[in-house]
Amino acid sequence: MASQKRILVIGAGVSGLTAIKACKEENLDVVCYERIGELGGLWRYHENDLDGLPSVMKSTISNTSKEMSSFTDFPPAKEFPTYMHHTAVLKYLEMYVEHFGLLSHITYYQEVIELIPAEDYGTTGKWLVKIRDLHSDENREEAFDGVMACVGHHAYPMSPSYPNMDVYAGQIIHSHSYKTFTGFEDKTVLVIGAGNSGADIAAELSNVAKKVYLSTRRGAWIYPRLFEKGKPCDVCNNRRYKTLLPSKYTMNKLEKFLNKRMDHERFGIKPYHSVSSQHPTINDELHAKLLNGRVIVRRDVKEFSETGVIFDGEEESTPIDVVFLATGYQVKFPFLSDDILRVGKNNKVLLYKNMFPPQLKHHTLAVIGLIQPNGSLFPVFEMQSRWFVALMTEKCHLPSTDTMLSSVRSTEGFRARNFVQSPRHSLEASWLSYMDEVADEFGVKPNMAALLLKDPKLFWACFFGPCLPYQYRLNGPHKWEGAREAILGYKSRMYGHIKNGREN
């Protein structure tokens, strides 16, 4: 009988938790090493920067609805709000950990220093891992049959350089370090970048600051959390039948809807590119802040001065007290050498399906979570973890190196043709397409034809309704008997907290 494979999970954030759970499903010997003393990663709020590790803002609310953000066999409680505050998200993660018994597999204050092929890697695919115990400050080495790198991509701030930046006398802070508005009252603030972090910071600070400028190079399409009839944005947009409609039609319809809520051109924030070419910026307040003048849109910064900045198309310096750089993050894996995983220009990483270095002889190393889909990350992390575990248990196999390299080039070409060329979009993917692609690799993609014949009611819900994550537990390995009920009854959970409020 073959010995039980030993798997290392690096990091106990959301992706790490899904990795542990997937390993447990296949009875693999899984160990998770977490650098700090708590699980939850980005979703565990820290008042101050904790050794450079990221955390949400104090006011952060999820940009994706709870039903579309759920794990595939663990629906969120109906008492949770439709869009969850970060405290509720963390509670959901803690409930997930308790329900599936994940905590015993996590060891805290363990930092992975280096990951290299073991001496017998050529025949076994094993990895030698160098680890530092942060309590004792002692180093050790351990061997693993497989490794899942679950460290995220929000740890290393990307800070652009502007002319005369060094002479500026005010504060320059990356959005990575922003936690709350305290300390910025009555300041004149500039936020550079109109992505989700930039829009959130600008909207929040406008409540207390003297003036807030929002500088954007390309503009942004601003999505509200609620769409038609108060339904969540992702519940409306991620539906299977829409993938069969002409892309131009669906994008024109979406652009008209967004402009109906806020005329992007009139407000000075309309991009030059189509609505499908940029990652969504989700914000419910920015349109009102632009209308009442609390946030003022400006073009890109041309240069700094001692007291402020000069924007493109302007000659005089605008006085600024504080500059926030909402300019994204660098992708880094300090424990991996370039011959294992190289990060190129604009955060481009050579990975098959955003997971596997294709040049390796054995695919016993996977990166989990290095992707930017236009939907919730939680079920994507879980899908990636389940695929890797299926590979480790030889229930499926990867194609040849040449085939994987060809796929990587094809994906890069697709991104070049369809998305803005920037570090922010180097990891961009269509949520539903990616989920289906990965699910198909190990037999958990829902069979629509079979559903139409055997269960028309469920087919209608899956095809015309939202593509809820539970769809990926209807068939295949580790299917969940509660998936059908979870799909058909999602509305009672989605608005459950509102109904409870009325009853009380």
Image (cartoon, rainbow, N blue to C red):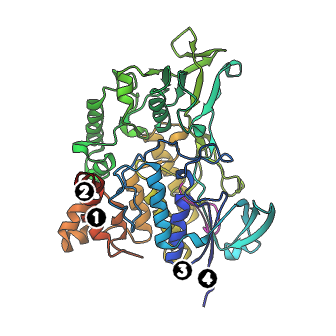
Q: Secondary structure at mark 3?
A: loop
Earlier in the chain: of badge 2 and badge 4, it is 4
Residue ID for mark 4: 4
Residue 249, x across and y down, in percent: 25, 40
Res 27 label: 3
Q: Amino acid at mark 4?
A: Gln
The residue drawn where x is 41% and y is 65% is 439
| Vertical position of residue 28 compared to residue 43: above or below | below
Residue ID for mark 1: 487
| Vertical position of residue 151 compared to residue 446: above or below | above
- Measure the alpha-carbon separation of dots 2 and 4: 41 Å
The residue drawn where x is 23% and y is 55% is 503
Does the segment drawn in magenta span residue 207? Answer: no
- The span shown in magenta is 358-369
Relative depth, front residue between 44 and 382: 44
Q: Is residue 399 visible?
A: no
Q: Amino acid at mark 3?
A: Asn
Do the CB atoms of the residues marked 4 and 3 lie less than 8 Å apart? Answer: yes
Q: Amino acid at mark 1?
A: Ile
Relative depth, front residue between 351 and 160: 160
